[in-house]
Amino acid sequence: MADWRLLITIAACWAAIRLSVGETHEPDPFLRRTLHVEPNKHLQHLETISDTEGSLARTFFSPAHRRAAEQIKSWMQDTGMETWIDAVGNVHGRIKASRDGAQAVLLGSHYDTVLDGGAYDGALGIIVGLAAVKGMLLTELVQRGWLDRLPPQPANDTDGDIVIPPTLASSLLTHGSVHLVAFTDEEGVRFQSTFLGSRAVAGTLLKYNMLASRDRSGNSLEQVLQDEGGVTDPRVAVASLALDPATISEYVEVHIEQGPVLVSRGLPLGVVAGIAGQTRLWVQVNGTQGHAGTVPMRNRRDALVASAELITAVEALCTVPESEGGVPEEENLVCTVGEVKVWPGASNVISGHTGFSVDIRSKTDSVRNDVVKQVLQIVDGTCHRRGVDCSVDRKHDAEAVLSDPEVLRNMGAAASMAKPLLLAALTQEEVQRSSGTIEGLQSVPVLVSGAGHDAMAIAEKIPKMGMMFTRCRGGVSHSPLEYVEPEDVTASTAALAVYLWGRVAGSMEAESETAATAPVDSGSSKVRDEL
Protein backbone atom coordinates (compact mmCIF):
# COMPACT_ATOMS: atom_id res chain seq x y z
CA MET A 1 0.00 0.00 0.00
CA ALA A 2 1.38 3.42 -0.94
CA ASP A 3 2.38 5.99 1.65
CA TRP A 4 -0.17 8.65 0.66
CA ARG A 5 1.31 11.18 3.06
CA LEU A 6 4.55 10.92 1.11
CA LEU A 7 2.74 11.72 -2.14
CA ILE A 8 0.92 14.66 -0.58
CA THR A 9 4.08 16.16 0.85
CA ILE A 10 5.98 15.55 -2.39
CA ALA A 11 3.36 17.67 -4.10
CA ALA A 12 3.84 20.35 -1.45
CA CYS A 13 7.58 20.21 -1.97
CA TRP A 14 7.06 20.66 -5.71
CA ALA A 15 4.94 23.76 -5.15
CA ALA A 16 7.18 25.28 -2.47
CA ILE A 17 10.38 24.87 -4.46
CA ARG A 18 8.79 26.31 -7.58
CA LEU A 19 8.06 29.42 -5.54
CA SER A 20 11.62 29.60 -4.25
CA VAL A 21 13.19 29.09 -7.68
CA GLY A 22 11.03 31.56 -9.58
CA GLU A 23 10.32 31.87 -13.29
CA THR A 24 13.87 32.91 -14.27
CA HIS A 25 15.44 29.90 -12.60
CA GLU A 26 17.73 31.54 -10.10
CA PRO A 27 19.02 28.83 -7.75
CA ASP A 28 18.06 29.15 -4.10
CA PRO A 29 21.28 30.12 -2.28
CA PHE A 30 20.62 27.93 0.77
CA LEU A 31 19.54 24.88 -1.20
CA ARG A 32 22.38 25.26 -3.68
CA ARG A 33 24.95 25.24 -0.92
CA THR A 34 23.26 22.41 0.95
CA LEU A 35 22.40 20.06 -1.93
CA HIS A 36 25.21 20.78 -4.39
CA VAL A 37 28.19 22.68 -3.04
CA GLU A 38 28.58 21.10 0.40
CA PRO A 39 28.23 17.41 -0.55
CA ASN A 40 30.65 17.67 -3.45
CA LYS A 41 33.10 19.65 -1.33
CA HIS A 42 32.84 17.14 1.51
CA LEU A 43 33.48 14.20 -0.81
CA GLN A 44 36.61 15.90 -2.10
CA HIS A 45 37.77 16.57 1.45
CA LEU A 46 37.20 12.99 2.61
CA GLU A 47 39.31 11.81 -0.32
CA THR A 48 42.30 13.65 1.17
CA ILE A 49 42.01 11.79 4.49
CA SER A 50 44.18 8.77 3.76
CA ASP A 51 46.89 6.64 5.35
CA THR A 52 48.86 6.49 2.11
CA GLU A 53 50.52 9.16 0.03
CA GLY A 54 49.16 9.44 -3.50
CA SER A 55 46.32 6.95 -3.02
CA LEU A 56 43.26 6.47 -0.83
CA ALA A 57 43.26 3.97 2.04
CA ARG A 58 41.26 4.11 5.28
CA THR A 59 41.11 0.89 7.24
CA PHE A 60 39.71 0.05 10.65
CA PHE A 61 41.12 2.25 13.46
CA SER A 62 43.98 3.60 11.35
CA PRO A 63 44.97 7.26 11.87
CA ALA A 64 43.09 8.34 8.73
CA HIS A 65 40.09 6.27 9.77
CA ARG A 66 39.94 8.14 13.09
CA ARG A 67 40.37 11.55 11.43
CA ALA A 68 37.57 10.78 8.99
CA ALA A 69 35.29 9.78 11.87
CA GLU A 70 35.86 13.09 13.64
CA GLN A 71 35.28 15.05 10.45
CA ILE A 72 32.01 13.25 9.73
CA LYS A 73 30.92 13.85 13.31
CA SER A 74 31.57 17.58 12.86
CA TRP A 75 29.48 17.69 9.69
CA MET A 76 26.68 15.88 11.51
CA GLN A 77 26.72 18.53 14.23
CA ASP A 78 26.34 21.25 11.59
CA THR A 79 23.19 19.45 10.45
CA GLY A 80 21.63 19.76 13.89
CA MET A 81 22.31 16.19 14.93
CA GLU A 82 23.12 14.69 18.30
CA THR A 83 26.38 12.84 17.59
CA TRP A 84 28.59 10.13 19.06
CA ILE A 85 31.18 7.55 18.03
CA ASP A 86 30.49 4.09 19.39
CA ALA A 87 32.89 1.41 20.65
CA VAL A 88 33.66 -0.03 17.20
CA GLY A 89 34.01 3.36 15.48
CA ASN A 90 30.54 3.81 13.96
CA VAL A 91 29.72 7.53 13.76
CA HIS A 92 26.10 8.26 14.70
CA GLY A 93 24.04 11.37 13.99
CA ARG A 94 20.45 11.59 15.18
CA ILE A 95 17.65 14.15 15.15
CA LYS A 96 14.73 13.12 17.32
CA ALA A 97 11.23 14.01 16.19
CA SER A 98 9.28 16.60 18.13
CA ARG A 99 6.64 13.91 18.71
CA ASP A 100 7.46 11.34 21.41
CA GLY A 101 7.69 7.71 20.36
CA ALA A 102 8.17 8.41 16.67
CA GLN A 103 10.20 5.82 14.79
CA ALA A 104 13.36 6.82 12.92
CA VAL A 105 14.35 6.46 9.30
CA LEU A 106 17.80 4.88 9.51
CA LEU A 107 20.33 6.02 6.90
CA GLY A 108 23.82 4.63 6.48
CA SER A 109 26.90 3.69 4.52
CA HIS A 110 30.58 3.10 5.30
CA TYR A 111 33.61 5.38 5.56
CA ASP A 112 36.37 2.76 5.32
CA THR A 113 37.91 2.01 1.92
CA VAL A 114 39.73 -0.72 0.09
CA LEU A 115 43.45 -0.19 -0.49
CA ASP A 116 44.00 2.24 -3.37
CA GLY A 117 40.26 2.80 -3.43
CA GLY A 118 37.95 5.45 -4.79
CA ALA A 119 36.42 8.52 -3.21
CA TYR A 120 32.74 7.59 -3.60
CA ASP A 121 32.31 3.97 -2.50
CA GLY A 122 30.63 4.25 0.90
CA ALA A 123 31.44 7.91 1.36
CA LEU A 124 28.75 8.96 -1.12
CA GLY A 125 25.99 7.43 1.00
CA ILE A 126 27.16 9.22 4.14
CA ILE A 127 27.64 12.62 2.52
CA VAL A 128 24.45 12.42 0.46
CA GLY A 129 22.61 11.36 3.62
CA LEU A 130 23.90 14.38 5.52
CA ALA A 131 23.13 16.82 2.71
CA ALA A 132 19.68 15.32 2.17
CA VAL A 133 18.79 15.71 5.84
CA LYS A 134 19.92 19.32 5.80
CA GLY A 135 18.15 19.95 2.49
CA MET A 136 14.98 18.37 3.86
CA LEU A 137 15.12 20.62 6.92
CA LEU A 138 15.64 23.74 4.79
CA THR A 139 12.78 22.70 2.51
CA GLU A 140 10.53 22.41 5.54
CA LEU A 141 11.67 25.86 6.72
CA VAL A 142 10.70 27.23 3.30
CA GLN A 143 7.33 25.48 3.50
CA ARG A 144 6.61 26.93 6.95
CA GLY A 145 8.04 30.38 6.20
CA TRP A 146 10.57 29.96 9.00
CA LEU A 147 13.84 30.78 7.24
CA ASP A 148 14.22 33.80 9.51
CA ARG A 149 14.60 31.39 12.45
CA LEU A 150 18.01 30.31 11.19
CA PRO A 151 20.92 31.97 13.01
CA PRO A 152 23.33 34.12 10.96
CA GLN A 153 25.09 31.92 8.41
CA PRO A 154 28.52 32.13 6.73
CA ALA A 155 28.35 34.53 3.82
CA ASN A 156 29.51 31.88 1.34
CA ASP A 157 30.63 28.28 1.26
CA THR A 158 34.31 29.18 1.61
CA ASP A 159 33.55 30.62 5.05
CA GLY A 160 31.87 27.45 6.30
CA ASP A 161 28.82 25.25 5.97
CA ILE A 162 25.22 26.14 6.70
CA VAL A 163 24.48 25.30 10.33
CA ILE A 164 21.08 24.29 11.69
CA PRO A 165 20.61 24.39 15.49
CA PRO A 166 19.55 21.06 17.05
CA THR A 167 16.39 22.45 18.65
CA LEU A 168 15.22 23.95 15.37
CA ALA A 169 16.04 20.72 13.49
CA SER A 170 14.04 18.63 15.95
CA SER A 171 11.03 20.95 15.80
CA LEU A 172 10.78 20.39 12.05
CA LEU A 173 10.47 16.59 12.30
CA THR A 174 6.80 16.03 12.97
CA HIS A 175 6.33 12.47 11.82
CA GLY A 176 9.59 10.67 12.48
CA SER A 177 13.19 10.89 13.59
CA VAL A 178 16.32 10.57 11.44
CA HIS A 179 19.33 8.46 12.42
CA LEU A 180 22.40 8.43 10.16
CA VAL A 181 25.23 5.96 10.79
CA ALA A 182 28.63 6.15 9.11
CA PHE A 183 29.67 2.52 9.42
CA THR A 184 33.23 1.95 10.59
CA ASP A 185 34.14 -1.04 8.42
CA GLU A 186 32.32 -2.66 5.52
CA GLU A 187 35.17 -3.69 3.25
CA GLY A 188 36.85 -5.94 5.82
CA VAL A 189 40.40 -5.06 4.75
CA ARG A 190 41.97 -5.36 8.20
CA PHE A 191 40.12 -8.37 9.62
CA GLN A 192 38.84 -10.01 6.41
CA SER A 193 35.35 -9.82 7.91
CA THR A 194 32.84 -7.69 6.06
CA PHE A 195 30.02 -5.57 7.56
CA LEU A 196 31.74 -5.11 10.93
CA GLY A 197 30.07 -1.77 11.65
CA SER A 198 26.59 -2.58 10.37
CA ARG A 199 26.56 -5.95 12.13
CA ALA A 200 27.32 -4.18 15.40
CA VAL A 201 24.32 -1.89 14.83
CA ALA A 202 22.15 -4.83 13.77
CA GLY A 203 23.21 -6.78 16.86
CA THR A 204 24.69 -9.74 14.96
CA LEU A 205 28.43 -9.13 15.34
CA LEU A 206 28.71 -11.55 18.25
CA LYS A 207 26.51 -14.08 16.45
CA TYR A 208 29.10 -14.27 13.66
CA ASN A 209 31.97 -14.50 16.17
CA MET A 210 33.63 -11.48 14.63
CA LEU A 211 35.48 -10.58 17.83
CA ALA A 212 37.70 -13.59 17.08
CA SER A 213 38.63 -12.28 13.60
CA ARG A 214 42.35 -11.54 13.33
CA ASP A 215 44.34 -9.04 11.35
CA ARG A 216 47.62 -9.78 9.55
CA SER A 217 49.55 -9.14 12.77
CA GLY A 218 47.57 -11.83 14.55
CA ASN A 219 45.59 -9.40 16.70
CA SER A 220 41.94 -10.27 17.23
CA LEU A 221 39.21 -7.67 16.90
CA GLU A 222 38.52 -8.15 20.61
CA GLN A 223 42.15 -7.37 21.44
CA VAL A 224 42.22 -4.35 19.11
CA LEU A 225 39.10 -2.90 20.72
CA GLN A 226 40.81 -3.21 24.11
CA ASP A 227 44.28 -1.98 23.10
CA GLU A 228 43.43 0.62 20.47
CA GLY A 229 39.85 1.48 21.34
CA GLY A 230 40.12 1.57 25.12
CA VAL A 231 37.15 -0.78 25.52
CA THR A 232 37.33 -2.64 28.83
CA ASP A 233 34.94 -5.46 27.95
CA PRO A 234 34.44 -5.66 24.16
CA ARG A 235 31.77 -8.36 24.36
CA VAL A 236 29.55 -6.29 26.65
CA ALA A 237 30.28 -3.09 24.73
CA VAL A 238 29.44 -4.63 21.36
CA ALA A 239 26.23 -6.18 22.66
CA SER A 240 25.07 -2.73 23.79
CA LEU A 241 25.45 -1.21 20.30
CA ALA A 242 22.47 -2.98 18.75
CA LEU A 243 19.61 -0.68 17.80
CA ASP A 244 16.12 -1.71 18.80
CA PRO A 245 14.32 -2.66 15.55
CA ALA A 246 11.06 -1.41 17.05
CA THR A 247 12.45 2.14 16.99
CA ILE A 248 13.29 2.01 13.25
CA SER A 249 10.69 2.48 10.52
CA GLU A 250 13.02 1.57 7.64
CA TYR A 251 16.64 1.55 6.50
CA VAL A 252 17.69 3.50 3.39
CA GLU A 253 21.14 3.48 1.79
CA VAL A 254 22.49 5.48 -1.16
CA HIS A 255 25.48 3.96 -2.93
CA ILE A 256 27.31 4.19 -6.23
CA GLU A 257 26.16 1.48 -8.59
CA GLN A 258 29.65 -0.02 -9.03
CA GLY A 259 28.49 -1.28 -12.41
CA PRO A 260 27.69 -0.06 -15.94
CA VAL A 261 23.89 -0.33 -16.18
CA LEU A 262 22.97 3.28 -15.33
CA VAL A 263 25.79 4.62 -17.50
CA SER A 264 24.69 2.50 -20.44
CA ARG A 265 21.11 3.75 -20.07
CA GLY A 266 22.12 7.37 -19.63
CA LEU A 267 20.29 7.60 -16.28
CA PRO A 268 21.56 9.16 -13.03
CA LEU A 269 19.65 7.08 -10.44
CA GLY A 270 18.14 3.66 -9.95
CA VAL A 271 16.34 1.93 -7.11
CA VAL A 272 17.43 -1.52 -5.97
CA ALA A 273 15.02 -4.45 -5.90
CA GLY A 274 17.43 -6.63 -3.98
CA ILE A 275 21.01 -7.62 -3.23
CA ALA A 276 22.30 -10.85 -4.70
CA GLY A 277 23.19 -13.72 -2.42
CA GLN A 278 26.85 -14.73 -2.37
CA THR A 279 28.93 -17.85 -1.79
CA ARG A 280 32.72 -17.85 -1.57
CA LEU A 281 34.61 -21.10 -2.00
CA TRP A 282 38.29 -21.92 -1.67
CA VAL A 283 39.37 -24.85 -3.82
CA GLN A 284 42.61 -26.61 -2.85
CA VAL A 285 44.28 -28.88 -5.41
CA ASN A 286 47.18 -31.12 -4.31
CA GLY A 287 49.27 -32.92 -6.90
CA THR A 288 52.89 -34.06 -7.03
CA GLN A 289 55.69 -31.51 -7.24
CA GLY A 290 58.43 -32.43 -9.70
CA HIS A 291 61.18 -31.37 -12.10
CA ALA A 292 59.87 -29.65 -15.22
CA GLY A 293 62.45 -31.37 -17.44
CA THR A 294 62.45 -34.94 -16.17
CA VAL A 295 58.86 -35.98 -15.44
CA PRO A 296 57.02 -37.25 -18.55
CA MET A 297 53.76 -35.52 -19.35
CA ARG A 298 51.67 -38.66 -18.96
CA ASN A 299 53.06 -39.27 -15.46
CA ARG A 300 52.36 -35.84 -14.03
CA ARG A 301 49.89 -34.89 -11.29
CA ASP A 302 50.07 -31.18 -12.06
CA ALA A 303 48.01 -29.18 -9.58
CA LEU A 304 48.14 -26.00 -11.64
CA VAL A 305 46.91 -27.58 -14.87
CA ALA A 306 44.07 -29.26 -12.97
CA SER A 307 43.17 -25.88 -11.45
CA ALA A 308 43.23 -24.22 -14.86
CA GLU A 309 40.74 -26.78 -16.17
CA LEU A 310 38.50 -26.24 -13.15
CA ILE A 311 38.59 -22.45 -13.52
CA THR A 312 37.54 -22.56 -17.17
CA ALA A 313 34.85 -25.12 -16.29
CA VAL A 314 33.39 -22.70 -13.71
CA GLU A 315 33.27 -19.94 -16.32
CA ALA A 316 31.61 -22.27 -18.84
CA LEU A 317 29.00 -23.35 -16.30
CA CYS A 318 28.02 -19.79 -15.50
CA THR A 319 27.80 -18.60 -19.11
CA VAL A 320 25.47 -21.26 -20.54
CA PRO A 321 22.64 -19.43 -22.39
CA GLU A 322 19.12 -19.87 -21.07
CA SER A 323 18.13 -21.38 -24.42
CA GLU A 324 20.61 -24.19 -23.74
CA GLY A 325 19.47 -24.87 -20.20
CA GLY A 326 21.41 -22.12 -18.45
CA VAL A 327 20.27 -19.72 -15.76
CA PRO A 328 17.87 -16.95 -16.90
CA GLU A 329 19.59 -13.59 -17.40
CA GLU A 330 17.34 -11.84 -14.88
CA GLU A 331 18.89 -13.97 -12.13
CA ASN A 332 22.09 -11.89 -12.50
CA LEU A 333 24.29 -14.98 -12.02
CA VAL A 334 27.99 -14.13 -11.92
CA CYS A 335 30.92 -16.43 -11.11
CA THR A 336 34.43 -15.15 -10.50
CA VAL A 337 37.85 -16.63 -9.78
CA GLY A 338 39.75 -13.69 -8.36
CA GLU A 339 42.65 -15.26 -6.49
CA VAL A 340 45.05 -18.07 -7.40
CA LYS A 341 47.95 -19.34 -5.30
CA VAL A 342 50.57 -21.62 -6.82
CA TRP A 343 53.27 -23.55 -4.97
CA PRO A 344 56.18 -23.40 -5.40
CA GLY A 345 55.60 -20.94 -8.25
CA ALA A 346 58.86 -21.57 -10.11
CA SER A 347 59.18 -21.78 -13.89
CA ASN A 348 61.10 -25.07 -13.79
CA VAL A 349 58.94 -26.87 -11.21
CA ILE A 350 55.68 -28.76 -11.71
CA SER A 351 53.16 -27.27 -9.31
CA GLY A 352 52.46 -29.49 -6.32
CA HIS A 353 49.82 -27.38 -4.61
CA THR A 354 47.38 -24.83 -5.99
CA GLY A 355 44.46 -22.99 -4.46
CA PHE A 356 41.92 -20.62 -5.93
CA SER A 357 38.82 -18.70 -4.89
CA VAL A 358 35.37 -18.99 -6.46
CA ASP A 359 32.79 -16.24 -5.92
CA ILE A 360 29.22 -17.10 -6.97
CA ARG A 361 26.35 -14.59 -6.81
CA SER A 362 22.72 -14.63 -7.90
CA LYS A 363 19.50 -12.78 -7.16
CA THR A 364 17.86 -16.03 -6.04
CA ASP A 365 19.35 -18.25 -3.35
CA SER A 366 18.01 -21.43 -4.91
CA VAL A 367 19.83 -20.69 -8.18
CA ARG A 368 23.05 -19.82 -6.36
CA ASN A 369 22.94 -22.99 -4.26
CA ASP A 370 22.28 -25.11 -7.35
CA VAL A 371 25.29 -23.60 -9.13
CA VAL A 372 27.45 -24.21 -6.06
CA LYS A 373 26.34 -27.84 -6.09
CA GLN A 374 27.30 -28.16 -9.75
CA VAL A 375 30.72 -26.59 -9.09
CA LEU A 376 31.37 -29.14 -6.35
CA GLN A 377 30.45 -31.95 -8.74
CA ILE A 378 32.80 -30.53 -11.39
CA VAL A 379 35.65 -30.35 -8.87
CA ASP A 380 35.06 -33.91 -7.73
CA GLY A 381 34.90 -35.34 -11.26
CA THR A 382 37.84 -33.40 -12.69
CA CYS A 383 40.15 -34.10 -9.78
CA HIS A 384 39.33 -37.82 -9.83
CA ARG A 385 40.01 -38.01 -13.57
CA ARG A 386 43.33 -36.17 -13.24
CA GLY A 387 44.47 -38.13 -10.19
CA VAL A 388 44.88 -35.11 -7.92
CA ASP A 389 43.48 -34.59 -4.43
CA CYS A 390 41.02 -31.75 -4.05
CA SER A 391 39.07 -30.16 -1.24
CA VAL A 392 36.56 -27.30 -1.17
CA ASP A 393 36.13 -25.00 1.81
CA ARG A 394 32.89 -23.00 1.86
CA LYS A 395 34.26 -19.76 3.30
CA HIS A 396 31.24 -17.46 3.18
CA ASP A 397 27.50 -17.52 2.52
CA ALA A 398 25.18 -14.54 2.42
CA GLU A 399 21.53 -14.95 1.57
CA ALA A 400 19.93 -12.70 -1.01
CA VAL A 401 18.09 -9.71 0.44
CA LEU A 402 15.01 -8.17 -1.14
CA SER A 403 14.03 -4.55 -0.72
CA ASP A 404 10.73 -3.71 0.93
CA PRO A 405 8.16 -3.08 -1.85
CA GLU A 406 6.75 0.04 -0.16
CA VAL A 407 10.17 1.59 0.40
CA LEU A 408 11.12 0.71 -3.17
CA ARG A 409 8.01 2.40 -4.60
CA ASN A 410 8.38 5.48 -2.43
CA MET A 411 12.05 5.90 -3.29
CA GLY A 412 11.26 5.64 -6.98
CA ALA A 413 8.46 8.18 -6.57
CA ALA A 414 10.74 10.56 -4.65
CA ALA A 415 13.48 10.31 -7.30
CA SER A 416 11.05 11.00 -10.14
CA MET A 417 9.69 14.03 -8.23
CA ALA A 418 13.08 15.52 -7.30
CA LYS A 419 13.46 17.71 -10.39
CA PRO A 420 12.32 21.00 -8.76
CA LEU A 421 14.68 20.50 -5.83
CA LEU A 422 17.54 19.67 -8.21
CA LEU A 423 16.79 22.79 -10.27
CA ALA A 424 16.81 24.85 -7.08
CA ALA A 425 20.37 23.71 -6.41
CA LEU A 426 21.94 24.25 -9.85
CA THR A 427 22.94 27.30 -11.85
CA GLN A 428 21.62 27.84 -15.36
CA GLU A 429 24.97 26.68 -16.77
CA GLU A 430 24.89 23.51 -14.68
CA VAL A 431 21.31 22.84 -15.72
CA GLN A 432 22.26 23.08 -19.39
CA ARG A 433 25.33 20.89 -18.88
CA SER A 434 23.38 18.23 -17.02
CA SER A 435 20.08 18.21 -18.91
CA GLY A 436 20.35 14.43 -19.28
CA THR A 437 20.59 14.03 -15.53
CA ILE A 438 17.55 16.21 -14.91
CA GLU A 439 15.36 14.53 -17.51
CA GLY A 440 16.68 11.14 -16.46
CA LEU A 441 14.91 11.50 -13.11
CA GLN A 442 11.66 10.82 -14.94
CA SER A 443 12.84 7.28 -15.69
CA VAL A 444 14.12 5.51 -12.58
CA PRO A 445 15.00 1.86 -13.33
CA VAL A 446 14.80 -1.01 -10.88
CA LEU A 447 18.16 -2.78 -10.52
CA VAL A 448 19.64 -5.75 -8.71
CA SER A 449 22.86 -5.28 -6.76
CA GLY A 450 25.53 -7.89 -7.37
CA ALA A 451 27.75 -6.30 -4.73
CA GLY A 452 27.18 -6.74 -1.02
CA HIS A 453 26.29 -3.68 1.03
CA ASP A 454 25.66 -2.77 4.66
CA ALA A 455 21.97 -3.05 3.84
CA MET A 456 22.41 -6.84 3.83
CA ALA A 457 23.57 -6.85 7.44
CA ILE A 458 20.94 -4.36 8.58
CA ALA A 459 18.13 -6.25 6.83
CA GLU A 460 18.79 -9.29 9.00
CA LYS A 461 17.17 -7.38 11.88
CA ILE A 462 15.37 -4.55 10.06
CA PRO A 463 13.91 -6.15 6.93
CA LYS A 464 12.13 -3.00 5.77
CA MET A 465 14.97 -1.58 3.72
CA GLY A 466 15.67 0.00 0.36
CA MET A 467 18.64 1.27 -1.64
CA MET A 468 19.23 3.89 -4.30
CA PHE A 469 22.09 3.61 -6.78
CA THR A 470 23.94 6.56 -8.29
CA ARG A 471 25.63 6.39 -11.67
CA CYS A 472 29.43 6.23 -11.59
CA ARG A 473 31.65 6.93 -14.58
CA GLY A 474 32.29 3.82 -16.64
CA GLY A 475 30.83 1.67 -13.88
CA VAL A 476 34.32 1.67 -12.31
CA SER A 477 34.69 1.17 -8.55
CA HIS A 478 37.33 0.05 -6.02
CA SER A 479 39.75 2.12 -8.06
CA PRO A 480 41.24 5.63 -8.07
CA LEU A 481 39.31 6.09 -11.33
CA GLU A 482 36.00 5.86 -9.44
CA TYR A 483 34.05 9.07 -10.12
CA VAL A 484 30.56 10.52 -9.85
CA GLU A 485 29.63 13.71 -11.69
CA PRO A 486 28.83 16.58 -9.28
CA GLU A 487 25.33 16.96 -10.72
CA ASP A 488 24.67 13.24 -10.14
CA VAL A 489 25.71 13.68 -6.51
CA THR A 490 23.19 16.51 -6.31
CA ALA A 491 20.49 14.42 -7.98
CA SER A 492 20.99 11.73 -5.34
CA THR A 493 20.82 14.31 -2.57
CA ALA A 494 17.67 15.91 -3.95
CA ALA A 495 15.92 12.55 -4.36
CA LEU A 496 16.75 11.44 -0.83
CA ALA A 497 15.74 14.85 0.56
CA VAL A 498 12.31 14.54 -1.07
CA TYR A 499 11.95 11.02 0.31
CA LEU A 500 12.88 12.14 3.83
CA TRP A 501 10.70 15.22 3.63
CA GLY A 502 7.70 13.02 2.95
CA ARG A 503 8.59 10.45 5.60
CA VAL A 504 9.57 12.50 8.65
CA ALA A 505 8.80 16.20 8.11
CA GLY A 506 5.83 18.24 6.96
CA SER A 507 3.46 19.82 9.43
CA MET A 508 0.02 18.27 9.90
CA GLU A 509 -1.60 21.61 9.07
CA ALA A 510 0.43 22.03 5.88
CA GLU A 511 -0.57 18.56 4.74
CA SER A 512 -4.32 19.12 5.08
CA GLU A 513 -4.04 22.42 3.18
CA THR A 514 -1.80 20.91 0.51
CA ALA A 515 -4.17 18.02 -0.09
CA ALA A 516 -6.85 20.52 -1.11
CA THR A 517 -4.85 23.28 -2.83
CA ALA A 518 -1.41 22.16 -4.05
CA PRO A 519 -1.15 21.70 -7.83
CA VAL A 520 -0.13 18.18 -8.82
CA ASP A 521 1.22 17.96 -12.36
CA SER A 522 1.12 15.01 -14.71
CA GLY A 523 4.33 13.63 -13.19
CA SER A 524 2.65 13.45 -9.79
CA SER A 525 -0.44 11.85 -11.29
CA LYS A 526 1.69 9.26 -13.05
CA VAL A 527 3.47 8.36 -9.83
CA ARG A 528 0.17 8.14 -7.95
CA ASP A 529 -1.26 5.84 -10.63
CA GLU A 530 1.81 3.61 -10.52
CA LEU A 531 1.66 3.39 -6.73
Image: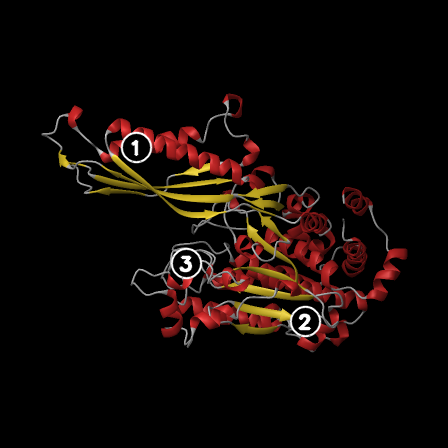
Q: Which residue is mark 1?
A: 308
Residue 356 is labelled as none
Give the vertical position of 372 relative to 112 (above or below).
above
Extreme residue in the right direction: 516
Q: Residue flagged by tag 1: what amino acid is it?
A: Ala
Marks 2/1: CA–CA distance: 57 Å
Extreme residue in the top direction: 324
Q: Are marks 2 and 1 in contact (CB under 8 Å)?
A: no
Q: For the residue carrying disc 2, how many other residues have a C-alpha within 10 Å: few (<14), some (14-19), or many (20+)?
A: many
Task: Give the residue at x 60% y 51%.
Answer: 467
Q: For the residue carrying disc 1, how many other residues have a C-alpha within 10 Å: few (<14), some (14-19), or many (20+)?
A: few
Q: Which residue is mark 2?
A: 96
Q: Residue flagged by tag 3: what amino acid is it?
A: Leu
Where's residue 375, x and y in %? 40, 34
Out of 157 and 177, give the one closest to the viewer. Answer: 177
Q: Is residue 221 visible?
A: yes
Q: Are marks 3 and 1 in contact (CB under 8 Å)?
A: no
Q: For the residue carrying disc 3, how many other residues have a C-alpha within 10 Å: few (<14), some (14-19), or many (20+)?
A: many
Q: Report whether 238 appears left or right of 39.
A: left
Q: Mark 3 or mark 2: which comes first in sequence? A: 3
Q: Report whether 237 appears left or right of 95.
A: left
Q: Are marks 3 and 2 in contact (CB under 8 Å)?
A: no
Task: Give the residue at x 37% y 29%.
Answer: 313
Q: Dot 2: what SS?
A: loop
Q: Dot 3: what SS?
A: loop
Marks 3/1: CA–CA distance: 34 Å
Q: Which residue is mark 3?
A: 56
